[in-house]
Every structure is written in structure tokens, then in C-alpha cells.
Image (spheres, grey):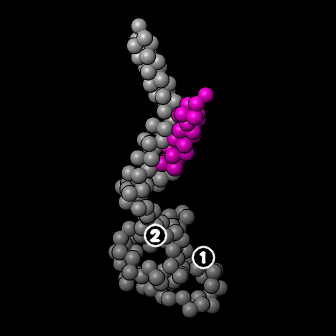
């Protein structure tokens, strides 16, 4: 078996499989980064709001430890909507879809005064968008194509050798 034959029979397909694996590893997250804003609500933090009774139990009616106090009326429209949804939700959670100017106060936990009652509110999930380099997806697809060519090199090589042998036989006649 010649060195050329070993190269095209074993080495090229092995390298091709490795390149396809790397290409898949690059193309999948790169492709997700391109479409994630269309299929998910990234960059919309999730807040949790406790009822007035749970807040009173948590702080034992002694008052919260220097937590900022926010009044419901001072929240942005998106914050008020999320607050209302969280109060109505069985788990007490909702996403803030829009402006979040009181985000820093709520992230660290704060008391929101709503209809004269205190409610503990905090951010439970940031839901950040996945960031990938712009060329990650196209380079991943290119690597997959290049790897497939490497994988298919043995049958291509055998076909070329067969054609060459036929040509040599025809020349001898």
C-alpha cells in the first residue's frame, strides 16, 4: 500500500470527521446567536414578587434590613406590568419586557409598596442574550463542508485510481 493510498484511505477521512465535529461545534451556537431574539425573550429579566403576607413573614414585621423602598406608581410601565403579572402568577414570577430603570434596586432585592402593602421583589434570572462572533456560523458551515469532502475522499480517490487504471489498459491496446 502506497503512502498516497494510506493518506486518502485513513488520514483524510479521520481529519474530515474532526473538522466536521469542530464545524458543528461552531455552527450550532453561531446559528442560535443569529436567531435567538426571534425565538426567545433574551435580555428580559425575570422578577419574583412575594405577597404581602410572605413579605411580613420574611422580615418578621421588624422591617427589612435597609432595602430600598419603591412605590408602585414610580415604577415604569414594563415594571408595573411585570409586577402585576408576578402577583397573579402562582410561582410569583414574570418577565420585564421593556424599560427597567429600577433594575439595580430590584436586582438586590427591594420593597415595593403597592396599595398600602409591602411586597418583596427581586430579580431571579437575568436571561442574557448569547453572544457569538459574526463569523462563527459561516465558518462553522464551511468547516462542515470541508470535513465532508475529507470524509468522502476515499471513494473519490478509488474512483480516480480506477479511471486511471482503465486509461492505462486502453492505452496498451
Q: CA distance from mark 2 to mark 1?
A: 22 Å
| 11 part of magenta stretch | yes
Q: Please tell me which residue is depicted at 43% across the width and 64% down the height of the picture.
A: 131
Q: Give the percent coordinates (x, y) of residue 106.
A: 48, 80
| Dot placed on the residue nearer the N-terminal end, 2 or 1 | 2
Closer to the camera, 60 or 134? 134
Q: Classify the position of the N terminus by image quarter.
A: top right
Number of marks in picture: 2
State the residue position of label 2. 45
Q: Please tell me which residue is depicted at 53% across the width and 81% down the height of the picture.
A: 109
Closer to the camera, 161 or 57? 161
| Displayed quadrant of residue 2 | top right
Q: Single out the residue that lies furthest toward the front.
A: 172
Q: Magenta region: which residues? A: 1-24
State the residue position of label 1. 54
**For numbered disc 1, what is the local secondary structure?**
helix
| Displayed quadrant of residue 96 | bottom left
Amino acid at each position: 500500500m502506497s503512502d498516497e493510498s494510506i493518506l486518502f484511505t485513513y488520514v483524510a477521512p479521520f481529519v474530515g470527521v474532526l473538522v466536521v465535529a469542530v464545524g458543528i461545534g461552531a455552527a450550532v451556537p453561531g446559528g442560535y446567536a443569529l436567531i435567538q431574539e426571534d425565538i426567545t425573550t433574551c435580555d428580559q429579566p425575570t422578577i419574583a414578587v412575594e405577597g404581602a403576607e410572605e413579605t411580613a413573614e420574611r422580615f418578621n414585621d421588624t422591617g427589612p434590613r435597609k432595602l430600598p423602598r419603591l412605590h408602585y406608581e414610580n415604577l415604569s410601565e414594563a415594571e408595573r406590568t411585570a409586577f402585576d403579572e408576578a402577583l397573579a402568577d402562582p410561582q410569583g414570577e414574570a418577565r420585564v419586557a421593556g424599560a427597567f430603570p429600577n433594575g439595580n434596586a430590584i436586582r438586590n432585592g427591594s420593597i415595593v409598596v403597592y396599595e398600602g402593602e409591602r411586597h418583596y421583589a427581586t430579580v431571579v434570572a437575568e436571561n442574557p442574550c448569547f453572544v457569538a462572533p459574526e463569523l462563527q456560523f459561516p465558518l462553522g458551515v464551511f468547516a462542515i463542508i470541508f470535513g465532508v469532502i475529507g470524509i468522502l475522499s476515499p471513494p473519490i480517490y478509488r474512483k480516480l485510481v480506477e479511471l486511471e487504471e482503465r486509461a492505462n489498459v486502453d492505452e496498451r491496446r
